[in-house]
Amino acid sequence: MKKFKWTMILSIIMLLISCGNGGEKPAAGGEAPAGGEAKKEIKIGVALYKFDDTFISSVKDAINEISDEKSKETGEKITINAVDGQGQQATQNDQVDTFITQGYDVIAVNMVDRTAASVIIQKAQAAGIPVVFFNREPVAEDMAKWDQLYYVGAKAEESGTIQGEVAADYFKANPDADKNKDGKIQYVILEGEPGHQDALLRTEYSIKALEAAGFQVDKLASDTALWQRANGQEKMAAWISAFGDKIELVLANNDDMALGAIEALKAAGYLSDGKFIPVIGVDATAPAKDSLKAGLLYGTVLNDARGQGKGIFDIAYALAKKENPAEKVQGITDGKYLWIPYQKVTKENVDKF
């Protein structure tokens, strides 16, 4: 009898516990009580070609900052997982595989090799996960393969044109910069990497802009420095040894290489005591802006890292919410491209940036 009574008491206690939960009850229609339903976590994978690229690192930071702002605004949990491809396409492919396996909502990719995008597209399409490419534009044929592919970047020919215009402005204001008085600008140019569209177009259009401004040009040397400061310094040091005062202009496809060239010039006694050679880069990174203010770098072209980061996040966020980015993000063209404009940056206006 005692055993029966204790069994009954335990049963009543268990029944009360199962019906309890603080007195809350599901809302009518099977809805959770007000404030009780957790918002779905949004997971965005970001595959970068290389972490130690100054500009790409700035884009990554911008994506994280804007994600934090959105999370505070909406109360949603937004996970940004950025991974380093270390300049290896095979590594990046594996990282994308991991994002797919872990069920990320959207994948943003800064390709190591823009011509290899089709592999990533096929995998993402099979998993139904949209992709936002950025900074390194896949070929048009790849971008046309699926309606859930987007691209955020800037038009490289525009940056080259602005770079050439900055150089033209210098030589118009300083006719004595034509040291040998031959009516031509003797220049050297540091290029990003072989076959890279930005390197090719920046190189081509910077010279076209100089010629369009009425200048004749004479290329003394060009070489790839793989976007890296140390490589730019090494190449520039060799050119100083080979050409010395014959060099009248230094162009670089990005600021890191330009800053490397400046280090080589300083070591050789240039950029002081009247021995000035204009060095012009692209990106307007923080170190480049400091160099501009110091009177070392002559000019650069703003590649808007925050603007690109915001565009990448805004498109990815809309896709994660199953919304049409073209309806949510201003400036998208052809249904899938978001172009962020470049801007000229010199010592006179650098404080605006």
Image (cartoon, rainbow, N blue to C red):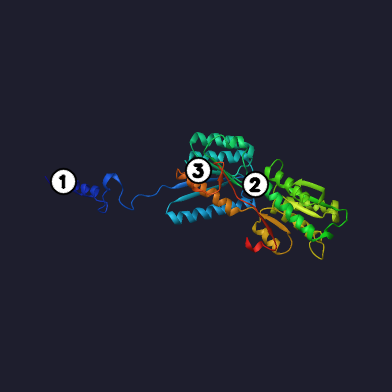
Q: Earlier in the sequence, mark 2 or mark 3?
A: 3
Note whether residue 229 is visible. no
Mark 1 residue element: helix
In the rendered image, which residue does mark 2 sit on? 155
Q: Position of residue 160 (x, y in %)?
A: 71, 49
How far is the residue under mark 3 from the one under mark 1?
54 Å
Mark 3 residue element: strand
Mark 2 touches mark 1? (CB < 8 Å)? no
**166, 299: nearer the viewer:** 166
Q: Position of residue 65 (x, y in %)?
A: 53, 55
Q: Position of residue 151 (x, y in %)?
A: 58, 43
**331, 89: nearer the viewer:** 331
Q: Position of residue 244 (x, y in %)?
A: 85, 55
Q: For residue 300, which quarter of the picture?
A: bottom right
Mark 2 residue element: loop
Q: Residue at x 62, y 51 (%)?
A: 341
Q: Quadrant of the N terminus?
A: top left
Above or below, 126 relative to 153: above
How far is the residue under mark 2 from the one under mark 3?
24 Å
| Crowd rating for badge 1 (residues with CA inside 10 Å; few <14, some 14–19, many 20+) | few
**Amino acid bearing label 1:** Met
In the rendered image, which residue does mark 1 sit on? 8
**Amino acid bearing label 3:** Val
| Crowd rating for badge 3 (residues with CA inside 10 Å; few <14, some 14–19, many 20+) | many
Note whether residue 55 is visible. yes
**Amino acid bearing label 2:** Lys
In the rendered image, which residue does mark 3 sit on? 106
